[in-house]
Amino acid sequence: MPDFNHPSGLLDAYLRANQKPTAARSVPRDGKFLTSADLNDALFIAERRNRRTANLVAKDGDRIEGADISIDRDASTASMTAGLIYINGDVKSIEAANDIAVNIVGDYRVGVRLNKTVVTEVEDPSLVGLHPGSKSEGEACAAIEVETIIWATQDDGGEGEFYAVYLLIDGTVIDQTPPPALTGITQAISSYDYNAHGNYIVKGCHVTALGPIDGAQHFSIEKGTANIEGFARSRQADLRHIEIEQPETEQVDGEPHTFTNGGAGDATIDVYHAPIDTVLACTVEKQVTRTITKGVTDSFDALPDNSITEIVAIVQGGTTYTSPADYSLDADQVSWIAAGSEPAPSSTYDITYKYLDSVVPVSYSDSQVVLAGGVENGTVTIQYTYKMPRIDLLCLDREGRSEYVKGLSSLDIA
């Protein structure tokens, strides 16, 4: 035979109906015994029916009256007022609670714990037969099961079953719609409101971009009320949304600029495509003077640098050579093939020339690259990737949570 012990734990109490989901009523019969199990079955069936009906109107955690919450973000605590809350098919009263520790990072639930206590004649002397002269007078009778609720959090480790009342996201209470906000009733009327008006803001809920912090974009959604899929979601505090940047990028292989520093040493370059994601490579045109040993007559003298763009001057003592009469630039070499003058073989001369050299940026921002070491009005090329334009949406879902919807990147977006 199955175990029909009563959930209360009383050794002399039994219940069968909790294991018979289709049982509709208990039927006492004349000439048959009537036991405590029969009465417990009848009470359980009636309670089960009432709970199913009540759940059509409300759900566990619905506030009927009071039971407001306030968050102290600095202390990471929550305080709740006294009130009435629908739990387990009944409306139960709850006392106020102050300074309960909560987690203000991520999703966190504040609610109540339902505790059940069985009271017998040992704890309550009135639970005996009361009619004078009857056989039951003064004898132990039925026990009472007492249910109470207290404020709790999802991870406090307390006794009793936990029922969520409030959802916190990063310390902000997501829905503070004043009671009574009965889920079943709002469910019934939500479709009418949504079909007539769609989703809309009742008040507040303006979005403010707070800017990038540590590679993530931060937004603030103002306190207010929004009707989402027909359900009103109210907040009495701003909601912070943090979105890790995940841009699509386009590469610029060699954007040309002119090195202009105004005598300050560094040149600040405004790129054509912003915002910059990563600077890959930079070249600047530098100017140097080297001492070179002349080779044989009518030959080529190799230079110690490459990517040379221009020979500025060649001087030996009091003689200044000219181009193209005396020399020319040929593949990073000085060509002395021309019919003009040239230094004597094995003698030295000073040559000043410009050449392109890779450099590491001093710094860069969303729209500017700072470079050093270039010659005034010299050539600059920058290879970089930039973040493509994209229109995204910051939304609220049916529960009042913030949701980030990414758009499609396109160069056509202004």
Image (tube, helix red, strand yellow):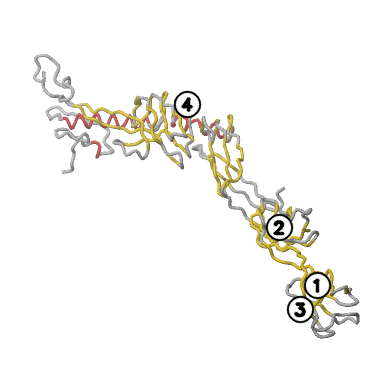
Instruction: Give the quadrant of residue 280.
Output: bottom right
Mark 2 residue element = strand
Q: Label 2 belongs to which residue?
A: 371
The quarter in which the N terminus is drawn is top left
Amino acid type indicated by mark 2: Leu
Amino acid type indicated by mark 3: Ala
Q: Residues within 10 Å of mark 3 (few under 14, many from 20)?
A: some
Tell me what residue is drawn at x 83 percent, y 79 percent: 335
Give the percent coordinates (x, y) of residue 151: 36, 31
Q: Label 3 belongs to which residue?
A: 302
Amino acid type indicated by mark 4: Pro
Q: Nearer the viewer, mark 1 or mark 2?
A: 1
Mark 1 residue element = strand
Give the percent coordinates (x, y) of residue 274: 69, 52
Tell me what residue is drawn at x 79 percent, y 53 percent: 262
Q: Is residue 234 visible?
A: no
Above-or-below relation of 371 to 18: below
- Decide which of tag 4 and tag 3 comes sooner along the chain: 4
Amino acid type indicated by mark 1: Ile
